[in-house]
Image (spheres, rainbow, N blue to C red):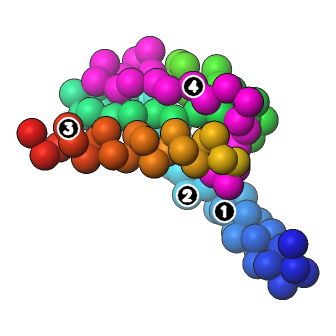
Amino acid sequence: MPDAHLLARVRVQTHYLLHHCFLDQQPILGHMTRLLAAPAIIVQGRLDLVCPPAAAASLASRWLAAELRMVENAGHLASNAKLASALVRALADFSRRLAV
Protein backbone atom coordinates (compact mmCIF):
# COMPACT_ATOMS: atom_id res chain seq x y z
CA MET A 1 0.00 0.00 0.00
CA PRO A 2 1.50 3.38 -0.93
CA ASP A 3 2.36 5.67 1.99
CA ALA A 4 -0.06 8.37 0.81
CA HIS A 5 -2.92 5.86 0.66
CA LEU A 6 -2.10 4.51 4.12
CA LEU A 7 -1.88 8.01 5.59
CA ALA A 8 -5.26 8.97 4.09
CA ARG A 9 -6.84 5.83 5.50
CA VAL A 10 -5.43 6.44 8.97
CA ARG A 11 -6.63 10.05 8.87
CA VAL A 12 -10.20 8.97 8.09
CA GLN A 13 -10.18 6.30 10.80
CA THR A 14 -8.74 8.72 13.36
CA HIS A 15 -11.35 11.35 12.43
CA TYR A 16 -14.15 8.86 13.08
CA LEU A 17 -12.65 7.70 16.37
CA LEU A 18 -12.15 11.27 17.60
CA HIS A 19 -15.84 11.91 16.96
CA HIS A 20 -17.02 8.64 18.54
CA CYS A 21 -17.97 7.35 15.08
CA PHE A 22 -20.62 10.09 14.93
CA LEU A 23 -22.92 8.14 17.23
CA ASP A 24 -24.85 9.84 19.97
CA GLN A 25 -24.70 8.68 23.56
CA GLN A 26 -27.45 6.12 23.05
CA PRO A 27 -26.22 2.98 21.26
CA ILE A 28 -27.80 1.77 18.04
CA LEU A 29 -29.75 -0.96 19.83
CA GLY A 30 -31.47 1.78 21.81
CA HIS A 31 -33.05 3.05 18.58
CA MET A 32 -34.34 -0.32 17.38
CA THR A 33 -38.00 0.66 17.59
CA ARG A 34 -37.42 2.90 14.56
CA LEU A 35 -36.03 0.00 12.52
CA LEU A 36 -38.19 -2.99 13.44
CA ALA A 37 -40.33 -2.98 10.29
CA ALA A 38 -37.67 -1.70 7.86
CA PRO A 39 -36.25 -4.44 5.65
CA ALA A 40 -32.50 -4.99 5.74
CA ILE A 41 -29.76 -7.45 4.93
CA ILE A 42 -26.88 -7.49 7.42
CA VAL A 43 -23.67 -8.83 5.88
CA GLN A 44 -21.06 -9.79 8.46
CA GLY A 45 -17.64 -11.40 8.26
CA ARG A 46 -17.35 -14.19 10.82
CA LEU A 47 -13.68 -13.28 11.46
CA ASP A 48 -14.33 -9.53 11.88
CA LEU A 49 -12.35 -8.24 14.87
CA VAL A 50 -13.50 -4.62 14.45
CA CYS A 51 -17.25 -5.29 14.49
CA PRO A 52 -17.60 -8.68 16.19
CA PRO A 53 -20.11 -11.15 14.70
CA ALA A 54 -21.89 -11.36 18.07
CA ALA A 55 -22.87 -7.70 17.65
CA ALA A 56 -24.40 -8.40 14.23
CA ALA A 57 -26.23 -11.43 15.63
CA SER A 58 -27.57 -9.34 18.50
CA LEU A 59 -28.74 -6.65 16.09
CA ALA A 60 -30.38 -9.20 13.79
CA SER A 61 -32.17 -10.89 16.69
CA ARG A 62 -33.84 -7.58 17.56
CA TRP A 63 -34.46 -6.34 14.02
CA LEU A 64 -37.55 -8.27 12.96
CA ALA A 65 -37.35 -7.46 9.24
CA ALA A 66 -33.59 -8.02 8.91
CA GLU A 67 -31.79 -11.01 7.48
CA LEU A 68 -28.28 -11.81 8.73
CA ARG A 69 -25.79 -13.22 6.24
CA MET A 70 -22.64 -14.43 7.94
CA VAL A 71 -19.65 -14.75 5.60
CA GLU A 72 -17.22 -17.51 6.55
CA ASN A 73 -13.48 -16.82 6.30
CA ALA A 74 -14.05 -13.07 5.98
CA GLY A 75 -13.15 -10.26 8.34
CA HIS A 76 -13.91 -6.56 8.38
CA LEU A 77 -12.60 -5.41 5.01
CA ALA A 78 -14.91 -5.30 2.01
CA SER A 79 -11.82 -5.86 -0.13
CA ASN A 80 -11.97 -9.52 0.95
CA ALA A 81 -13.26 -11.35 -2.13
CA LYS A 82 -15.84 -13.42 -0.21
CA LEU A 83 -17.18 -10.44 1.71
CA ALA A 84 -17.27 -8.26 -1.42
CA SER A 85 -19.18 -10.97 -3.27
CA ALA A 86 -21.66 -11.31 -0.40
CA LEU A 87 -22.19 -7.53 -0.34
CA VAL A 88 -22.82 -7.41 -4.10
CA ARG A 89 -25.24 -10.33 -3.79
CA ALA A 90 -27.05 -8.63 -0.88
CA LEU A 91 -27.41 -5.39 -2.85
CA ALA A 92 -28.82 -7.26 -5.83
CA ASP A 93 -31.26 -9.21 -3.63
CA PHE A 94 -32.35 -6.07 -1.81
CA SER A 95 -32.81 -4.19 -5.10
CA ARG A 96 -35.09 -6.98 -6.33
CA ARG A 97 -37.13 -6.80 -3.11
CA LEU A 98 -37.60 -3.05 -3.51
CA ALA A 99 -38.63 -3.40 -7.15
CA VAL A 100 -41.59 -5.65 -6.31
- Name the N-terminal-most of marks 4 and 3: 4
Q: Residue 2, position in %: x, y?
A: 87, 79
Which circle's residue, 2 or 3, is located before the other in the chain? 2
Locate residue 85: give its quadrant.
Answer: top right
Mark 3 closeness class: few <14, some 14–19, many ≥20 residues within 10 Å: few
Q: Amino acid at mark 2?
A: Phe
| Secondary element at image label 1 | helix
User: Residue 16's mark?
Assistant: 1
- Residue 22 image label: 2
Amino acid type of the residue tagged 1 in the rendering: Tyr
Question: Which residue is situated farthest in the top direction here?
Answer: 61
- Residue 3 bears which disc, if any? none
Disc 4, disc 2: CB below 8 Å?
no
Q: Position of residue 63 (x, y in %)?
A: 36, 23
Q: Earlier in the sequence, mark 1 or mark 2?
A: 1
Magenta part of the chain: 60-79
Whether residues under marks 1 and 4 lie with C-beta atoms below 8 angstroms apart, the answer is: no
Q: State left or right for residue 17 relative to residue 35.
A: right
Q: First in sequence, mark 3 or 1: give its number.
A: 1
Residue 97 tag number: 3
